[in-house]
Image: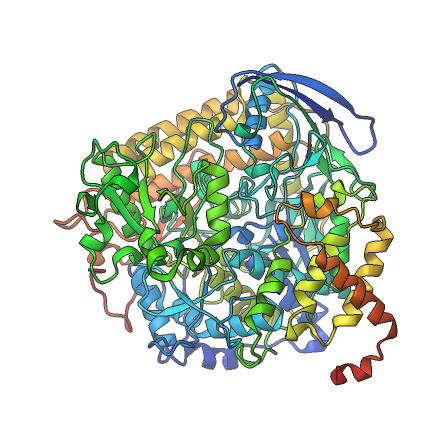
């Protein structure tokens, strides 16, 4: 197949970028989207032009490195699929494809399609953990966790931290990312001791980097792991409770 | 050679070695720990767990990762699970049995004492990870669920859907980020280690390049921990992530650290077959699928019917036929070689006839399609996205691919290399898996090293350094190391050749796969030994690295591929010198009558540890003999 690419090129964080057009003939439908970019880069290199910089690593949809706006959609047209697992068979011969970096103030562009997502690490750092120093843990089966609870926690924990939710949101809000991490931990019995402190710290940190949620729901649509916005509701509930809860009374429910 | 090749395995019966040794080793008191600087390179399971633990204990830790976030490390892609001798199923598991299975699975080429320690601490890992909130799969009663894995006859594998590596890595990452918040761990992302600094034979620090600004900096410490993973990407096509590389290990090797058993590579039996020339990497389908999937090929090589139309008696379930007691759950090397045999006989399936079927039809009719889907949903979805086929309707097609490297930097019982002060953890070291790793044991080893071994053995080393400041970064050793990094960067940018880095990487990968892949022989290995240096010379004359800005992915790759060339050559040398078959290393010349790997314990029951011979020089092969006092040396049999 033959496609035309319009790609955002930007040499560095502090310079102005622009859309450049590249002709991409002889592309196989069996290629992944990133393999198509590999081929384009090989050709650019052969012509003496600098290849397009883009982030990618595992190419199995789990590391969360890749991410780009493809025709205005985070990770492109296939639902529940990261850019690395998108295949060219989802496009048609003759298509024009627009490729841009994540668009969000909290994710500044470093080069071409690569952005800085360090703000996510700051949110996790603020409280996205259960304090359990190495060596202090009791036997793993001491506390039963109902299967439904473990499953719900896992649904939230599946987040890969790619940033598509932020990029898709008209407000560049990070509620889906933050609530996924919060619910992973807040749902489990092991996460109860720090539940409200964690919620408050992570939400407050999130607010310093990202916009606010106005319930558009674009994040859920863009999420390659199809994480539900229900988690945002649970997070908001816990955040309100965190303002009121006397932590000494936690054990009394 | 720097240092010694003494394994430092403590005396006494194997069950008590580690317990007694923990008491015998020196400690660093809590108020003295902040006086020590520790550098950790890599933030996967081994690196993140070590950083979290050492940070909690009060050491000053600096962590370097080339990723934008520690959470990207390739541990995240491990799917199937993590082994532990919990015996929660009451089906006969024990530390002794996990130890035995691992030594046997490694085809008697690992160090017994290290493996026993691994089996001992495996139970603590599960406790630790559950306490941190890893959402392992549960039974309806709320207790932990287990599944079985290749090479074992018990259910000892804990899992979190098909994303066990992700959940464990996130657990260790979160614990480390807690320490970043607490100020004990200083995190440097997008920072690639490009050299190890060795001063008077002792590891003293690292040279690091900031991948955004291009700034090269010097970092000094009392000890350096390499937790930098394996080198499967030598083959270009592998299941490793694209950034995974061997440069940290290789740079340390060039500075004197011995590289052990480089030829031991694991070819994973269940990957999606390559679809064409442009393939950039291969995707693994977890081995756990072999619990419910049956592997077969049509008996007729010219079969053209769709798989569901092939009647039972015209199918060859070759693993069940040849290995009735383990069936589809034979270890990875055995499963891989048998699949290769079928494809070589022309019985392969799929458009390129380069795969075998992995069929869930029988399991779905036994326990129900929804149960099977629940067990493997993310794998089935991933398979469908890549191939456009639904494994619930059509059998999967699978074929072996390079997956893991058992070889790595040589370490003693303390996980210290022969260079004092340089420790190596996780896949980057060689010690626990021998010539073949069992499924669900990589996560176990990474976390065992990082959580439950290094804090003891590092303290034992550091205790002797109390009152000694780290080497100053303006020392000549640092200056010289930084100069060599700067020179290499300039050299790449000035070659101005015609072909891309990826071109050379692909070509190297082809040589490695053809001659040092699933089966090796003398003729092929000697051919590779002449082809690799020729290709490397061409690379250094003709590679084209474009770009004048500081952030330059071609430049990053060029350095990694340059190191792969040297490592690839060493792998071939090692494979040539080891004139026996063992585990993942199959020499055509050394096989039994029915085509199984044939070891030569008289001549090769040892670790081969290679010393760098300088640019253009010959490396030296050192030997650490292996003694098997607790697990009897036998020819492996999974029949």
Q: Is residue B594 positioned above or below B171 on the image?
A: above
Is residue B509 or residue B150 the one in the foreground? B150
Looking at the picture, how far across and down is residue B5, in whole percent? 41, 60
| Residue B55 appears in the picture as rendered | no
Instruction: Answer left or right for B89 relative to A20.
Output: left
Q: Residue furthest left?
A: B593
- Up the image or down, B261 lies above or below B588; here it is below
Q: In which quadrant of the rendered view does residue B459 lie?
A: bottom right
Residue B409 located left or right of residue B485: left
Going by the image, does A82 lie left or right of B593? Answer: right
Q: Residue at x 29, y 73 (%)?
A: B630
Q: Is residue B207 visible?
A: yes
Return the x and y of residue A120 as percentages of the image width and height. 74, 52
Residue at (57, 64) in percent of width and height: A151
Along the line of sight, the residue nearer the viewer: A102 or A224: A224
Instruction: Report whether B280 appears left or right of A111.
Output: left
């Amino acid at each position: 197949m033959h496609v035309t690419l319009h790609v955002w090129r930007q040499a560095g964080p502090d310079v102005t970028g622009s859309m450049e057009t590249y002709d991409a003939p002889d592309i196989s439908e069996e290629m992944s989207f990133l393999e198509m970019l590999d081929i384009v880069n090989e050709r650019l290199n052969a012509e003496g032009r600098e290849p397009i910089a883009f982030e990618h690593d595992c190419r199995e949809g789990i590391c969360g490195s890749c991410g780009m706006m493809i025709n205005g959609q985070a990770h492109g047209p296939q639902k529940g699929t990261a850019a690395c697992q998108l295949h060219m068979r989802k496009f048609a011969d003759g298509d024009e494809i627009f490729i841009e970096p994540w668009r969000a103030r909290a994710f500044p562009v470093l080069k071409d399609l690569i952005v800085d997502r360090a703000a996510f690490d700051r949110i996790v750092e603020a409280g996205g953990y259960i304090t359990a120093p190495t060596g202090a843990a009791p036997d793993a089966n001491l506390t039963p966790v109902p299967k439904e609870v473990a499953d719900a926690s896992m649904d939230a924990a599946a987040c890969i931290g790619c940033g598509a939710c932020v990029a898709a949101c008209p407000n560049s809000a990070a509620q889906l990312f933050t609530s996924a991490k919060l619910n992973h931990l807040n749902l489990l019995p092991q996460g109860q001791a720090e539940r409200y402190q964690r919620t408050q710290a992570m939400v407050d940190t999130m607010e310093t980097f990202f916009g606010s949620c106005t319930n558009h729901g674009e994040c859920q649509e863009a999420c390659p792991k199809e994480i539900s916005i229900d988690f945002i509701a649970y997070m908001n509930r816990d955040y309100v409770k965190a303002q009121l809860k006397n932590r000494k009374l936690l054990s009394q429910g | 050679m720097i240092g010694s090749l003494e394994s430092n395995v403590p005396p006494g019966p194997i069950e008590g070695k580690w317990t007694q040794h923990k008491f015998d080793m020196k400690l660093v008191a809590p108020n003295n720990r902040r006086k020590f600087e520790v550098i950790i390179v890599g933030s996967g399971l081994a690196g993140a767990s070590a950083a979290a633990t050492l940070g909690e204990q009060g050491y000053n830790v600096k962590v370097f990762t080339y990723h934008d976030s520690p959470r990207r490390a390739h541990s995240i892609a491990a799917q199937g699970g993590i082994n532990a001798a919990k015996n929660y199923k009451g089906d006969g598991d024990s530390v002794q049995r996990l130890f035995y299975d691992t030594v046997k699975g490694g085809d008697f080429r690992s160090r017994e004492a290290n493996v026993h320690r691994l089996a001992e601490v495996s139970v603590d890992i599960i406790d630790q990870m559950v306490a941190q909130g890893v959402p392992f799969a549960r039974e309806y009663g709320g207790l932990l669920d287990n599944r079985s894995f290749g090479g074992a006859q018990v259910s000892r594998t804990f899992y979190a859907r098909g994303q066990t590596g992700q959940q464990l890595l996130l657990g260790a990452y979160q614990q480390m980020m807690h320490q970043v918040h607490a100020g004990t761990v200083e995190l440097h992302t997008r920072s690639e280690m490009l050299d190890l600094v060795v001063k008077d034979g002792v590891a003293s620090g690292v040279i690091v390049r900031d991948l955004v600004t291009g700034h090269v900096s010097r970092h000094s410490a009392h000890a350096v921990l390499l937790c930098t993973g394996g080198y499967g990407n030598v083959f270009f096509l592998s299941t490793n992530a694209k950034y995974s590389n061997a440069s940290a290990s290789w740079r340390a090797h060039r500075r004197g650290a011995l590289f052990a058993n480089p030829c031991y590579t694991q070819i994973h039996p269940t990957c999606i077959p390559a679809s064409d020339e442009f393939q950039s990497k291969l995707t693994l389908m977890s081995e756990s699928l072999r619990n419910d999937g049956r592997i077969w090929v049509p008996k007729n090589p010219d079969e053209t019917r769709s798989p569901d139309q092939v009647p039972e008696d015209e199918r060859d379930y070759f693993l069940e036929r040849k290995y009735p007691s383990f069936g589809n759950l034979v270890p990875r090397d055995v499963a891989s070689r048998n699949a290769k045999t079928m494809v070589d006989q022309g019985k392969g399936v799929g458009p390129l006839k380069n795969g075998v079927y992995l069929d869930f039809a029988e399991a779905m009719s036994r326990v129900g399609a929804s149960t099977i889907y629940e067990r493997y949903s993310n794998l089935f979805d991933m398979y469908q996205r890549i191939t456009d086929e639904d494994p619930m309707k059509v059998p999967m097609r699978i074929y072996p691919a390079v997956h893991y490297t058992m070889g790595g930097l040589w370490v003693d019982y303390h996980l210290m290399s022969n260079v004092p002060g340089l420790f190596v953890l996780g896949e980057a070291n060689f010690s626990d898996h021998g010539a073949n790793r069992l499924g669900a044991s990589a996560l176990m080893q990474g976390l065992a090293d990082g959580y439950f071994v290094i804090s003891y053995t590092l303290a034992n080393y550091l205790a002797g350094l109390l009152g000694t400041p780290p080497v100053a970064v303006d020392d000549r050793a640092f200056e010289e190391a930084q100069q060599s990094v700067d020179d290499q960067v300039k050299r790449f940018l000035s070659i101005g050749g015609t072909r891309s880095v990826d071109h050379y990487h692909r070509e190297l990968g082809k040589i490695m796969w053809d001659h040092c892949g699933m089966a090796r022989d003398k003729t092929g290995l000697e051919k590779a030994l002449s082809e690799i240096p020729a290709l490397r010379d061409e690379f250094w004359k003709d590679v084209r690295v474009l770009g004048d800005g500081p952030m330059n992915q071609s430049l990053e790759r060029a350095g990694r591929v340059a190191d792969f060339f040297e490592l690839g050559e060493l792998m071939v040398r090692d494979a040539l010198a080891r004139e026996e078959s063992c585990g993942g290393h199959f020499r055509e010349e050394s096989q039994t009558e029915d085509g199984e790997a044939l070891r030569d314990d008289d001549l090769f029951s040892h670790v081969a540890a290679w010393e760098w011979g300088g640019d253009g020089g010959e490396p030296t092969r050192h030997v650490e003999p292996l003694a098997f006092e607790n697990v009897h040396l036998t020819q492996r049999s999974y029949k």
